[in-house]
Amino acid sequence: MTVSELANYWLIKPDTIRYYVKIGLLKPSKNPHNGYKLFSEQEQNKLGFILQAKSLGFTLSDIKQIINQADSGLSPCPQVKEIMAKRLSETEAKLKKMQADFLHMKQALDSWQEQADCQPSGEQICHLIQNSFVEK
C-alpha cells in the first residue's frame, strides 16, 4: 500500500503517516520505479497497533518504546501495564481537577445570575470576574 492508500484505509491524513515514518514508527520500503513509499502488511498492522495504542492514551514515545521492545524479541506487556497504570493515575488526577473546575465555574455562574451588570470603569473591566474567588 502507498501512503494515500494506507491513509484512506485507516481514515487518517497522509501527513500523519509521513510523520510516523519520519520519527521511525513506520519503516516503509520504496518503489524503485517511482520512489513512492510502500507499506508491507506488517507495517500496515503496525499502524493499526499505533492508532489503537494512541486511542488508549499511549504517547508516540511510549509506542516507540513498546515497538522497540517487541522488535528486540522481548514481551512489551509488562511495560504496557506499567505505562497504562501511570496514564490511568494521571487521567484520574486530571478528571478530579476538571470536576473541581466545573463546580467552581457552575457556582460562579449561579452567583453571577443574581448580580446586576455594571459598566466598566478604570478600576474594573468586569466585576463578575474580578470579584470572583480565585485559587492560587
Image: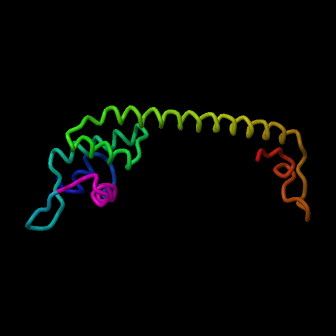
* Residue at 34%, 32% in the rendered image: 78
Position of residue 37 measured from the top left corner of the image (x, y, whole percent): 18, 60
Quarter-wise, where is residue 76 in the image?
top left
Q: Please determine whether, in this image, residue 59 is positioned above or below residue 13.
A: above
Residue stretch in magenta: 15-28
Q: How many badges with numbers are in the image?
A: 0
Position of residue 56 measured from the top left corner of the image (x, y, whole percent): 41, 37
Position of residue 38 measured from the top left corner of the image (x, y, whole percent): 16, 56
Is 41 left or right of 46, judged from the image as shown? left
Position of residue 24 measured from the top left corner of the image (x, y, whole percent): 28, 56
User: Is residue 18 magenta-colored?
Assistant: yes
Task: Report the residue that reaches farthest toward the left.
Answer: 33
* Residue at 24%, 40% in the rendered image: 70
* Residue at 53%, 36% in the rendered image: 91
User: Is residue 12 magenta-colored?
Assistant: no
Q: How is the image coloured?
A: rainbow
Is 83 left or right of 130, judged from the image as shown? left
Q: Nearer the viewer, residue 28 or 33?
A: 28
* Residue at 53%, 38% in the rendered image: 90
Q: Please determine whether, in this image, residue 1 is positioned above or below residue 84.
A: below
Is 111 left or right of 85, judged from the image as shown? right
